[in-house]
Amino acid sequence: MLAGRFLLLLLLLLASPVSAQTGTVARLPTATEEVERLLRAGDLAAALAHADAALAREPRNLTLRFVRAVILADQGKTAEAIAAFEELTQDFPELPEPYNNLAVLLAAQGQLEQARALLLRALQAQPNYLTAQENLGDLYVALAAEAYQRVLTMDPGNRNVQSKLALTRELSTRLRATR
């Protein structure tokens, strides 16, 4: 019996990395930590593969699902990223971040009204969410430009609206440069 316990203890010690300096058992990174490490290293493909594998084991892991959606967006897989963020808004309607990220993707596709509604939902979920507030401000500039452009299609000689459109376009360019 003592030999069996010794063997079990020996196997546990061999299986657990131990720091020579402190004598403490090193902890293996969580799936989320590993995905984040891969992201920091710039390996989006490996990060996505690791996230997918981890989500197969933990399909309700909110953090992994969110990071996976961000990776998809970063890879330019916009349709997949939109679907992933939409699922997050349905499964976790109390969280503002998925609404915000979904709004950014839709705004980039020119779906400004849908993006506005999503940003308002994000702010309803968390009124002090500054990123959503900032994105809403940027969106209002884009909506203003769109409105001025519509006026000019009906009244092309309107100098006042031409000036306003030029200002909103200049502001939009400067806003993009600050990101």
Image (cartoon, rainbow, N blue to C red):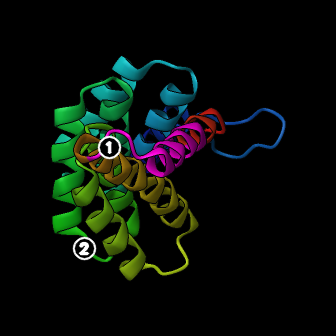
Q: Nearer the viewer, residue 95 or 16?
A: 95
Q: Eyeballing the image, is 149 above or below 119?
A: above
Q: Residue furthest right?
A: 21
The residue carrying mark 2 is 93
Identity, as a three-letter code, of the amino acid under mark 2? Pro
The disc placed on residue 12 is: none
Alpha carbon separation for disc pair 2 and 1: 39 Å
Label total for image: 2
Q: Residue at x 23, y 48 (%)?
A: 111
**Image position, residue 164 (x, y; %):** 51, 49
Q: Residue at x 66, y 39 (%)?
A: 178
The residue carrying mark 1 is 152
Identity, as a three-letter code, of the amino acid under mark 1? Leu
Q: Nearer the viewer, residue 135 or 89?
A: 135
Say which quadrant the C terminus sits in.
top right
Res. 167 image quadrant: top right
Q: Residue at x 84, y 36 (%)?
A: 21
Q: Secondary structure at mark 2?
A: loop
Q: Eyeballing the image, is 22 above or below 90?
A: above
Is residue 61 on the magenta stretch?
Answer: no
Q: Residues within 10 Å of mark 2 (few under 14, many from 20)?
A: some
Res. 174 image quadrant: top right
**Image position, residue 153 (x, y; %):** 25, 41
Q: Is residue 75 visible?
A: yes
Res. 23 image quadrant: top right
Q: Residue at x 59, y 37 (%)?
A: 170
**Image position, residue 175 (x, y; %):** 60, 42
Q: Eyeballing the image, is 102 above or below 37?
A: below
Residue span colored magenta: 155-171
